[in-house]
Image (spheres, rainbow, N blue to C red):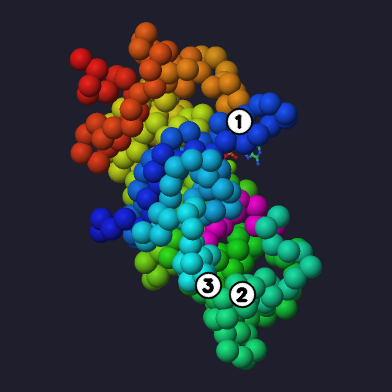
Amino acid sequence: MTYKIEKLVEVKNLKKYFKVGKHQVLHAVENVTFDIYRGETLGLVGESGCGKSTTGRTIIRLYEATAGEVFFEGINVHGKKNKGDLKKLNRKMQMIFQDPYASLNPRMTVMDIIAEGIDIHGLASSPEERRIKVYKLLETVGLNREHANRYPHEFSGGQRQRIGIARALAVEPEFIIADEPISALDVSIQAQVVNLMQKLQEERRLTYLFIAHDLSMVKFISDRIGVMYLGNLVELAESDELYDNPLHPYTQALLSAIPIPDPKVERSRKRIVLEGDLPSPINPPTGCRFHTRCPHAMEICKRHEPKWLEVKDKHWAACHLHDLNKF
Ligand SMILES: Nc1ncnc2c1ncn2[C@@H]1O[C@H](COP(=O)(O)OP(=O)(O)O)[C@@H](O)[C@H]1O
Ligand SMILES: [Mg+2]
Protein backbone atom coordinates (compact mmCIF):
# COMPACT_ATOMS: atom_id res chain seq x y z
CA MET A 1 0.00 0.00 0.00
CA THR A 2 1.23 3.48 -0.74
CA TYR A 3 0.41 6.71 0.94
CA LYS A 4 1.15 10.31 0.23
CA ILE A 5 2.92 12.26 2.87
CA GLU A 6 0.09 14.50 3.99
CA LYS A 7 -0.23 14.85 7.73
CA LEU A 8 -3.78 14.21 8.83
CA VAL A 9 -3.10 13.93 12.55
CA GLU A 10 -0.19 15.42 14.47
CA VAL A 11 0.45 14.32 18.03
CA LYS A 12 2.97 16.46 19.89
CA ASN A 13 4.37 15.68 23.33
CA LEU A 14 1.06 14.20 24.39
CA LYS A 15 0.67 13.38 28.07
CA LYS A 16 -2.24 11.83 29.86
CA TYR A 17 -2.12 11.32 33.61
CA PHE A 18 -4.84 9.88 35.79
CA LYS A 19 -5.34 10.65 39.42
CA VAL A 20 -5.58 7.44 41.36
CA GLY A 21 -6.45 7.42 45.01
CA LYS A 22 -5.88 10.65 46.85
CA HIS A 23 -2.30 11.52 46.11
CA GLN A 24 -1.10 9.30 43.34
CA VAL A 25 -0.75 10.06 39.69
CA LEU A 26 -0.63 7.40 37.03
CA HIS A 27 1.47 8.39 34.02
CA ALA A 28 -0.45 6.53 31.32
CA VAL A 29 0.92 8.45 28.32
CA GLU A 30 4.18 10.36 28.52
CA ASN A 31 5.55 12.67 25.83
CA VAL A 32 4.23 10.83 22.85
CA THR A 33 4.97 12.44 19.48
CA PHE A 34 4.06 11.15 16.03
CA ASP A 35 2.19 12.01 12.84
CA ILE A 36 -0.44 10.01 11.03
CA TYR A 37 -0.52 10.43 7.26
CA ARG A 38 -3.69 10.57 5.24
CA GLY A 39 -4.61 7.19 3.82
CA GLU A 40 -2.20 5.13 5.86
CA THR A 41 -2.70 2.55 8.57
CA LEU A 42 -0.53 3.25 11.55
CA GLY A 43 -0.28 0.28 13.87
CA LEU A 44 0.23 0.91 17.58
CA VAL A 45 1.49 -2.04 19.60
CA GLY A 46 2.74 -2.85 23.07
CA GLU A 47 1.84 -4.94 26.09
CA SER A 48 -1.44 -4.51 27.90
CA GLY A 49 -1.39 -1.38 30.06
CA CYS A 50 1.30 0.48 28.07
CA GLY A 51 -1.08 3.30 27.14
CA LYS A 52 -2.34 2.44 23.66
CA SER A 53 -6.03 2.93 24.39
CA THR A 54 -5.35 6.06 26.41
CA THR A 55 -3.36 7.48 23.50
CA GLY A 56 -6.21 6.73 21.09
CA ARG A 57 -8.86 8.06 23.41
CA THR A 58 -6.95 11.25 24.08
CA ILE A 59 -6.36 11.83 20.36
CA ILE A 60 -10.07 11.54 19.70
CA ARG A 61 -10.90 13.72 22.73
CA LEU A 62 -12.66 11.06 24.78
CA TYR A 63 -10.07 12.19 27.35
CA GLU A 64 -8.72 15.66 27.95
CA ALA A 65 -4.96 15.81 27.43
CA THR A 66 -2.87 16.51 30.54
CA ALA A 67 -0.36 18.28 28.30
CA GLY A 68 0.71 18.36 24.69
CA GLU A 69 -1.25 18.85 21.52
CA VAL A 70 -3.15 16.98 18.88
CA PHE A 71 -3.92 18.51 15.51
CA PHE A 72 -6.46 17.12 13.08
CA GLU A 73 -6.28 18.76 9.68
CA GLY A 74 -4.63 21.64 11.44
CA ILE A 75 -7.38 22.03 14.07
CA ASN A 76 -6.09 21.97 17.64
CA VAL A 77 -8.20 19.13 19.01
CA HIS A 78 -7.81 20.08 22.66
CA GLY A 79 -7.82 23.82 22.13
CA LYS A 80 -10.65 26.30 21.85
CA LYS A 81 -12.79 25.53 18.86
CA ASN A 82 -15.70 27.19 17.12
CA LYS A 83 -18.90 25.18 16.63
CA GLY A 84 -18.04 24.28 13.06
CA ASP A 85 -14.66 22.82 13.96
CA LEU A 86 -16.14 20.92 16.89
CA LYS A 87 -18.79 19.37 14.67
CA LYS A 88 -16.18 18.53 12.08
CA LEU A 89 -13.97 16.79 14.65
CA ASN A 90 -16.88 14.82 16.07
CA ARG A 91 -17.73 13.59 12.61
CA LYS A 92 -14.38 13.08 10.96
CA MET A 93 -12.76 11.13 13.80
CA GLN A 94 -14.46 7.89 14.78
CA MET A 95 -13.59 4.96 16.97
CA ILE A 96 -14.13 1.22 16.72
CA PHE A 97 -13.82 -0.74 19.95
CA GLN A 98 -12.44 -4.09 20.94
CA ASP A 99 -15.67 -5.40 22.36
CA PRO A 100 -18.42 -4.39 19.99
CA TYR A 101 -21.00 -5.86 22.32
CA ALA A 102 -20.12 -3.57 25.18
CA SER A 103 -20.15 -0.58 22.85
CA LEU A 104 -23.53 -1.28 21.27
CA ASN A 105 -26.61 -0.30 23.23
CA PRO A 106 -28.45 -3.62 23.79
CA ARG A 107 -31.85 -1.95 23.85
CA MET A 108 -31.48 -0.23 20.50
CA THR A 109 -32.14 -1.81 17.12
CA VAL A 110 -29.29 -1.99 14.67
CA MET A 111 -31.13 0.64 12.61
CA ASP A 112 -31.11 3.12 15.47
CA ILE A 113 -27.55 2.29 16.51
CA ILE A 114 -26.21 2.96 13.04
CA ALA A 115 -28.43 5.99 12.49
CA GLU A 116 -27.48 7.71 15.72
CA GLY A 117 -24.68 9.70 14.13
CA ILE A 118 -26.79 10.40 11.07
CA ASP A 119 -29.39 11.97 13.37
CA ILE A 120 -26.92 13.93 15.47
CA HIS A 121 -25.24 15.41 12.43
CA GLY A 122 -28.43 15.86 10.40
CA LEU A 123 -27.16 13.74 7.54
CA ALA A 124 -30.59 12.52 6.41
CA SER A 125 -33.39 14.86 5.37
CA SER A 126 -36.22 12.34 5.74
CA PRO A 127 -36.95 9.06 7.54
CA GLU A 128 -36.83 7.39 4.15
CA GLU A 129 -33.33 8.71 3.42
CA ARG A 130 -32.22 7.67 6.90
CA ARG A 131 -33.48 4.15 6.33
CA ILE A 132 -31.87 3.85 2.93
CA LYS A 133 -28.57 5.10 4.32
CA VAL A 134 -28.62 2.45 7.02
CA TYR A 135 -29.50 -0.28 4.50
CA LYS A 136 -26.59 0.79 2.32
CA LEU A 137 -24.22 0.82 5.28
CA LEU A 138 -25.31 -2.66 6.30
CA GLU A 139 -24.59 -3.90 2.80
CA THR A 140 -21.26 -2.08 2.76
CA VAL A 141 -20.10 -4.04 5.81
CA GLY A 142 -21.37 -7.38 4.53
CA LEU A 143 -24.69 -7.54 6.40
CA ASN A 144 -28.13 -7.01 4.90
CA ARG A 145 -31.19 -4.88 5.39
CA GLU A 146 -33.10 -7.61 7.21
CA HIS A 147 -30.64 -7.15 10.05
CA ALA A 148 -31.78 -3.57 10.66
CA ASN A 149 -34.63 -4.36 13.01
CA ARG A 150 -32.73 -6.78 15.19
CA TYR A 151 -30.84 -6.21 18.44
CA PRO A 152 -27.10 -6.61 19.10
CA HIS A 153 -27.45 -9.85 21.06
CA GLU A 154 -28.85 -11.57 17.99
CA PHE A 155 -25.47 -11.30 16.23
CA SER A 156 -22.15 -13.11 16.36
CA GLY A 157 -18.98 -11.32 17.48
CA GLY A 158 -17.84 -10.75 13.92
CA GLN A 159 -21.24 -9.42 12.88
CA ARG A 160 -21.31 -7.09 15.86
CA GLN A 161 -17.94 -5.70 14.87
CA ARG A 162 -19.39 -5.09 11.40
CA ILE A 163 -22.24 -3.17 13.03
CA GLY A 164 -19.67 -1.13 14.95
CA ILE A 165 -17.88 -0.38 11.69
CA ALA A 166 -21.15 0.60 9.98
CA ARG A 167 -21.93 2.94 12.87
CA ALA A 168 -18.53 4.59 12.50
CA LEU A 169 -18.92 4.90 8.73
CA ALA A 170 -22.39 6.43 9.00
CA VAL A 171 -21.00 9.92 9.59
CA GLU A 172 -18.47 9.67 6.75
CA PRO A 173 -15.30 9.86 8.82
CA GLU A 174 -11.79 10.39 7.51
CA PHE A 175 -9.93 8.95 10.46
CA ILE A 176 -10.81 5.82 12.43
CA ILE A 177 -9.14 4.66 15.60
CA ALA A 178 -9.60 0.92 15.82
CA ASP A 179 -8.80 -0.18 19.37
CA GLU A 180 -8.00 -3.89 19.16
CA PRO A 181 -10.97 -4.42 16.83
CA ILE A 182 -10.18 -8.08 16.22
CA SER A 183 -8.69 -9.18 19.55
CA ALA A 184 -11.99 -10.51 20.88
CA LEU A 185 -12.88 -12.38 17.67
CA ASP A 186 -12.23 -15.98 16.65
CA VAL A 187 -9.10 -16.29 14.56
CA SER A 188 -11.17 -17.46 11.60
CA ILE A 189 -13.20 -14.23 11.74
CA GLN A 190 -10.29 -11.86 12.32
CA ALA A 191 -9.10 -11.90 8.72
CA GLN A 192 -12.60 -11.18 7.45
CA VAL A 193 -12.89 -8.06 9.57
CA VAL A 194 -9.39 -6.94 8.59
CA ASN A 195 -10.16 -7.50 4.91
CA LEU A 196 -13.33 -5.48 5.27
CA MET A 197 -11.43 -2.65 6.91
CA GLN A 198 -8.85 -2.67 4.13
CA LYS A 199 -11.51 -2.64 1.44
CA LEU A 200 -13.23 0.30 3.10
CA GLN A 201 -9.92 2.09 3.42
CA GLU A 202 -9.28 1.80 -0.30
CA GLU A 203 -12.80 2.80 -1.29
CA ARG A 204 -13.01 5.76 1.07
CA ARG A 205 -9.39 6.73 1.53
CA LEU A 206 -9.72 6.23 5.27
CA THR A 207 -6.86 6.67 7.67
CA TYR A 208 -6.51 4.18 10.50
CA LEU A 209 -4.80 4.11 13.83
CA PHE A 210 -4.87 0.38 14.43
CA ILE A 211 -4.20 -0.61 18.02
CA ALA A 212 -3.09 -4.17 18.72
CA HIS A 213 -1.33 -5.90 21.57
CA ASP A 214 0.75 -8.22 19.44
CA LEU A 215 2.87 -7.75 16.38
CA SER A 216 1.75 -10.66 14.22
CA MET A 217 -1.47 -9.36 12.60
CA VAL A 218 -0.47 -5.75 12.74
CA LYS A 219 2.38 -6.18 10.27
CA PHE A 220 -0.01 -7.39 7.62
CA ILE A 221 -2.28 -4.37 8.05
CA SER A 222 0.00 -1.47 8.84
CA ASP A 223 2.06 0.80 6.64
CA ARG A 224 3.97 1.95 9.69
CA ILE A 225 4.09 0.67 13.24
CA GLY A 226 4.69 2.42 16.54
CA VAL A 227 5.76 0.51 19.64
CA MET A 228 4.80 1.66 23.13
CA TYR A 229 6.31 0.74 26.48
CA LEU A 230 5.00 2.04 29.80
CA GLY A 231 3.45 5.18 28.34
CA ASN A 232 6.32 6.01 26.00
CA LEU A 233 6.50 5.60 22.29
CA VAL A 234 9.86 3.85 21.94
CA GLU A 235 10.08 3.18 18.20
CA LEU A 236 8.25 3.98 14.97
CA ALA A 237 9.09 2.90 11.44
CA GLU A 238 7.66 1.51 8.23
CA SER A 239 6.39 -2.00 8.92
CA ASP A 240 9.03 -3.93 6.96
CA GLU A 241 11.80 -1.79 8.35
CA LEU A 242 10.58 -2.31 11.91
CA TYR A 243 10.48 -6.08 11.45
CA ASP A 244 13.75 -6.36 9.55
CA ASN A 245 15.72 -3.86 11.52
CA PRO A 246 14.29 -3.16 14.97
CA LEU A 247 16.48 -0.67 16.82
CA HIS A 248 14.95 -0.55 20.26
CA PRO A 249 15.73 -3.48 22.58
CA TYR A 250 12.09 -3.59 23.61
CA THR A 251 10.95 -3.95 19.99
CA GLN A 252 13.58 -6.64 19.50
CA ALA A 253 12.18 -8.55 22.46
CA LEU A 254 8.59 -8.20 21.24
CA LEU A 255 9.52 -9.42 17.77
CA SER A 256 11.49 -12.35 19.14
CA ALA A 257 8.31 -13.58 20.82
CA ILE A 258 6.40 -14.05 17.55
CA PRO A 259 6.37 -17.72 16.54
CA ILE A 260 7.63 -18.41 13.02
CA PRO A 261 5.36 -20.70 10.93
CA ASP A 262 8.31 -22.62 9.42
CA PRO A 263 9.22 -25.30 12.04
CA LYS A 264 12.89 -25.39 11.01
CA VAL A 265 13.30 -21.66 11.41
CA GLU A 266 11.11 -21.72 14.51
CA ARG A 267 13.47 -24.17 16.23
CA SER A 268 16.39 -21.81 15.78
CA ARG A 269 14.42 -18.75 16.82
CA LYS A 270 16.15 -16.91 19.62
CA ARG A 271 13.76 -15.52 22.16
CA ILE A 272 14.78 -12.48 24.10
CA VAL A 273 13.21 -12.97 27.50
CA LEU A 274 12.91 -9.76 29.45
CA GLU A 275 13.89 -9.94 33.07
CA GLY A 276 11.84 -8.46 35.84
CA ASP A 277 8.26 -7.31 36.00
CA LEU A 278 6.61 -4.48 34.19
CA PRO A 279 7.10 -1.46 36.48
CA SER A 280 4.10 0.54 37.65
CA PRO A 281 3.12 3.65 35.69
CA ILE A 282 2.43 5.26 39.06
CA ASN A 283 6.11 5.21 39.86
CA PRO A 284 7.82 4.75 36.53
CA PRO A 285 11.61 4.24 36.44
CA THR A 286 13.79 7.31 36.02
CA GLY A 287 15.70 7.97 32.81
CA CYS A 288 14.67 5.49 30.17
CA ARG A 289 11.59 3.72 31.47
CA PHE A 290 12.81 0.49 29.95
CA HIS A 291 16.20 0.49 31.67
CA THR A 292 15.13 -1.85 34.49
CA ARG A 293 14.49 -4.63 31.96
CA CYS A 294 16.80 -3.73 29.11
CA PRO A 295 19.54 -6.25 28.28
CA HIS A 296 21.72 -3.36 27.02
CA ALA A 297 21.12 -0.85 29.81
CA MET A 298 23.98 1.56 30.46
CA GLU A 299 24.59 4.10 33.24
CA ILE A 300 23.15 6.95 31.21
CA CYS A 301 19.88 5.07 30.78
CA LYS A 302 19.12 5.31 34.48
CA ARG A 303 19.63 9.03 34.59
CA HIS A 304 18.59 10.54 31.30
CA GLU A 305 15.44 10.05 29.33
CA PRO A 306 16.45 9.25 25.74
CA LYS A 307 15.29 11.73 23.10
CA TRP A 308 12.76 10.81 20.48
CA LEU A 309 14.90 10.97 17.34
CA GLU A 310 14.67 10.14 13.67
CA VAL A 311 17.64 7.82 13.90
CA LYS A 312 17.47 6.74 10.26
CA ASP A 313 15.33 8.01 7.42
CA LYS A 314 11.69 7.59 8.55
CA HIS A 315 12.79 5.45 11.47
CA TRP A 316 12.28 6.92 14.93
CA ALA A 317 13.49 5.61 18.26
CA ALA A 318 14.06 6.76 21.82
CA CYS A 319 17.12 4.83 22.98
CA HIS A 320 20.57 5.83 24.16
CA LEU A 321 22.10 3.10 22.01
CA HIS A 322 20.95 5.11 19.03
CA ASP A 323 21.19 8.59 20.41
CA LEU A 324 23.32 10.45 17.89
CA ASN A 325 24.28 13.14 20.38
CA LYS A 326 25.72 10.67 22.85
CA PHE A 327 29.33 10.84 21.83
N1 LIG B 1 -9.68 5.89 33.29
C1 LIG B 1 -8.54 5.50 33.89
N2 LIG B 1 -8.27 5.82 35.17
C2 LIG B 1 -7.11 5.44 35.78
N3 LIG B 1 -6.15 4.73 35.16
C3 LIG B 1 -6.37 4.37 33.87
C4 LIG B 1 -7.56 4.72 33.18
N4 LIG B 1 -7.50 4.23 31.92
C5 LIG B 1 -6.33 3.59 31.84
N5 LIG B 1 -5.64 3.67 33.00
C6 LIG B 1 -4.29 3.13 33.28
O1 LIG B 1 -3.43 3.71 32.31
C7 LIG B 1 -2.47 2.76 31.86
C8 LIG B 1 -2.62 2.58 30.37
O2 LIG B 1 -3.83 1.96 30.12
P1 LIG B 1 -4.37 1.68 28.63
O3 LIG B 1 -4.23 2.92 27.83
O4 LIG B 1 -5.72 1.10 28.74
O5 LIG B 1 -3.33 0.60 28.10
P2 LIG B 1 -3.45 -0.41 26.87
O6 LIG B 1 -4.58 0.04 26.01
O7 LIG B 1 -2.12 -0.31 26.18
O8 LIG B 1 -3.67 -1.76 27.44
C9 LIG B 1 -2.74 1.49 32.66
O9 LIG B 1 -1.88 1.47 33.77
C10 LIG B 1 -4.19 1.65 33.08
O10 LIG B 1 -4.43 0.96 34.28
MG1 LIG C 1 -6.26 -1.01 25.42
Q: Is mark 1 within 8 Å of ligand 1?
A: yes
Q: Position of residue 13 (x, y in %)?
A: 41, 39
Task: Identify the residue at horizontal 73%, vertical 73% (top origin).
Answer: 109
- Provide the secondary structure element on which disc 3 rests: loop
* Looking at the image, residue 85 lies above or below residue 17: below
Q: Is residue 12 magenta?
A: no
Distance from label 2 to label 1 (Cα)? 35 Å
Task: Identify the residue at horizontal 60%, vertical 25% (top origin).
Answer: 282
Among the two numbered marks 3 and 2 on one chain, the one whose residue lies closer to the N terminus: 2
Quarter the N terminus occupies: bottom left
Q: Which residue is mark 1?
A: 26
**For residue 164, what is the image quadrant?**
bottom right
Query: In the depicted view, which residue is nearer to us: 17 or 250?
Result: 17
Task: Identify the residue at horizontal 43%, vertical 47% (top origin).
Answer: 69
Judge from the rendering whether residue 276 lies leftward or rightward of residue 10; answer left or right: right
Residue situated furthest top in the rendering = 299
